[in-house]
Amino acid sequence: MRQKIYLMLIPFYLLAAVSSRAGSKEEMALRLNFGLKIFPYIMATDSDLSSKMTDSGSFLILIIYRKERERAENLKQGIIKRGGTIKSIPIQAVTTDDLEKTVSDSGCPSAIFLSEYLPGETFQKIIDFAIMNRVIVFSPIIGDVKRGATAGIYLSTSTLPSLNLTTLKKSRIQIGKKLRKLSKKYQ
């Protein structure tokens, strides 16, 4: 397990090395790419994940966008290409710019991945929904974990997963101890 965690962190060290030279578009692409790699591991550490399967026996991941639908669709394809399972359970990924409609049509998601910056009110509605339904909100966007997203990416001299402990506590999501230990934490 320890070796798997170290292997999982290699892309973050690479991101740290490249991001200082990258422009904002390139850095965003890198953040999204590394987000795709770390997101399944973060989901897998949710101790209550098995209760978040759909009736069809899969995990429903909502990829939420505001304007960049193509980016969200590319993330969806990336999730599927990276194995399409978490803990051997198939993933169903859905892109949306309308959380309420998608939840009404597809049911409560197992997790949410934010594919771009969302303004305050829209972002807060997603966080409130996630807290109420005990759903992880992952965002690779700078500052989103500080704003309330459950998990994301933290860049400094190294690249680490980041967790918002307040959101975790409010949503009653239990994240594995190893991930908590490795992560940059926000209150």
Image (cartoon, helix red, strand yellow):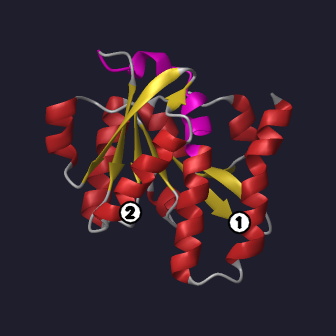
Residue found at the far front of this picture: 81
The answer to whether residue 52 is magenta is yes
Q: Amino acid at mark 2?
A: Arg
Highlighted magenta segment, given as a residue range: 39-55
Number of callouts: 2
Whole-percent x and y of residue 186?
60, 53
Residue 163 visible (yes or no): no
Q: Residue at x 55, y 35 (%)?
A: 83
* 18 displayed left or right of 152: right
Q: Which numbered disc, 2 or 1, marks the residue closer to the eye?
A: 2
* 18 displayed left or right of 50: right
Residue under pointer 2: 71
Instruction: Classify mark 1: helix, strand or loop.
Output: helix
Whole-percent x and y of residue 77?
43, 48
Residue toward you, 145 or 161: 161
* 35 displayed left or right of 94: right
The answer to whether residue 149 is magenta is no
Q: Residue at x 15, y 34 (%)?
A: 105
Whole-percent x and y of residue 59?
40, 27
Residue toward you, 33 or 178: 33
Q: Earlier in the sequence, mark 2 or mark 1?
A: 1
**Residues at badges 2 and 1 in contact (C-beta under 8 Å)?**
no
Q: Amino acid at mark 1?
A: Leu
Instruction: Classify mark 2: helix, strand or loop.
Output: helix
Rounded to the nearest whole Å, what is the CA distance between mark 2 and mark 1? 19 Å
- The label number, if any, that marks residue 15 in the structure image: 1
Which quadrant does the N terminus fall into?
top right
Label 1 crowding class (10 Å Cα cut-off): few <14, some 14-19, many 20+? Answer: many
